[in-house]
Amino acid sequence: MERRKVVIIGSGPAGFTSAIYTARANLQPLLFEGFFSGPSGGQLMTTTDVENYPGFPDGITGPDLMNNFRKQAIRFGTDVVTEDVKECDFSKGPFVIRSSKREVQADTVIISTGATAKRLDVEGTRDGEFWQRGVTACAVCDGAMPIFRNKDLYVIGGGDTAVEEALFLTKYASKVYMVLRRDSFRASKIMADRALQHPKIEIIYNHTISLVEGEAVVTSVTLEDVTNKKTTKRVAGGVFFAIGHTPNTAFLGNQVEMHDSGYLKVVSGTTQTSKEGVFAAGDVQDHVYRQAVTAAGSGCMAALEAERWLVMKGLTG
Ligand code: NDP
């Protein structure tokens, strides 16, 4: 069976940064970029302009940025395979990584499979309907698009993410409505207060979204009052799901420790998981920052920690 010093699972900013660093350290990493699990490049592939990634004063599109990451990783010798990892065996070293096409032994593994923003299965919001034509799951990524300017925007959810997204959208929207399915926030008090006190934000309690309609882009939403099932159609320029994320960790079974939410546990200030020699970088272990630049930063940390671990175990030769 083929044996690698480093196998990287996942192809967002964290995975490709780990690849750049381990490839430059002559560790010849193998990176599984995924196939059915989504486009190589992760969540940035579904965004338009990225304006907050340092080094690009005029901005760059998400796909262009990720294509650059990928090219840079390959330039230094990363082998990239377009396959999904189905399962891993971390019971003993070398670890075993299986996709539908291959089985590889790995001395160290860096998991950087990211997280997927949750969406509701509501009519009008699905792929091929208004998804990415006014319906998104990331205000920070998409909110500055011209279609959302000076429009009434609807943020679905009442957690810290929803508040952050609503506050962000106030820069562009004429008004931001937060739709909460119950009569109170899940967000921390300080964040909830910010939303409550913001003149451009209005909270709609005890409602769910039941329909999104439009023409080229979204023009209306229908909300349902959960207390009496009464529906109301309202003019809208955009819908932003902010109902949490699901980390992509199901394929790991219970081989590494996770938080109840499914995010991987790492030793504080490091990328070390509960399994020695297995590291985690990017959103798969970070439910707080979730930015491309923080993911890339932790990808660098994982690469340096993996390299040190290989040296410590005498596995670099
Ligand atoms: P949360 O799980 O905290 O909140 C999810 C929100 O979405 C809740 O209001 C929930 O409602 C609502 N929701 C969930 N499912 C549905 C549904 N089917 N229909 C309608 N509404 C739904 O997720 P977040 O992403 O907000 O936060 C995740 C973690 O990250 C938290 O620990 C948070 O504190 C942290 N975080 C911290 C930040 C910071 O410190 N600045 C910023 C962002 C996140 P309900 O309450 O009724 O369940």
Image: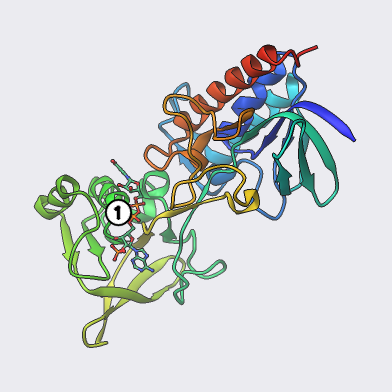
**At which x and y percent is residue 234?**
26, 75
**At which x and y percent is residue 72?**
67, 23
Point 36% across, 56% down: residue: 242
| Quarter location, residue 240 | bottom left
- 173 vs 274, nearest the viewer: 274
Q: Is mark 1 within 8 Å of ligand 1?
A: yes
Quarter of the image where the C terminus is located = top right
Q: Classify mark 1: residues with Cα within 10 Å, few (<14), some (14-19) or many (20+).
A: many
Asked if residue 212 can be seen in this view, the reply is yes
Q: Give the amino acid at mark 1.
A: Ala
- 2 vs 170, nearest the viewer: 2
Relative to 172, 249 lies left or right: right
Point 21% across, 56% down: residue: 174
- 15 vs 124, nearest the viewer: 15
Q: Is residue 7 above or below residue 228?
A: above
- 115 vs 123, nearest the viewer: 115
**At which x and y percent is residue 165?**
30, 49
- How many badges with numbers are in the image? 1
Relative to 27, 251 lies left or right: left
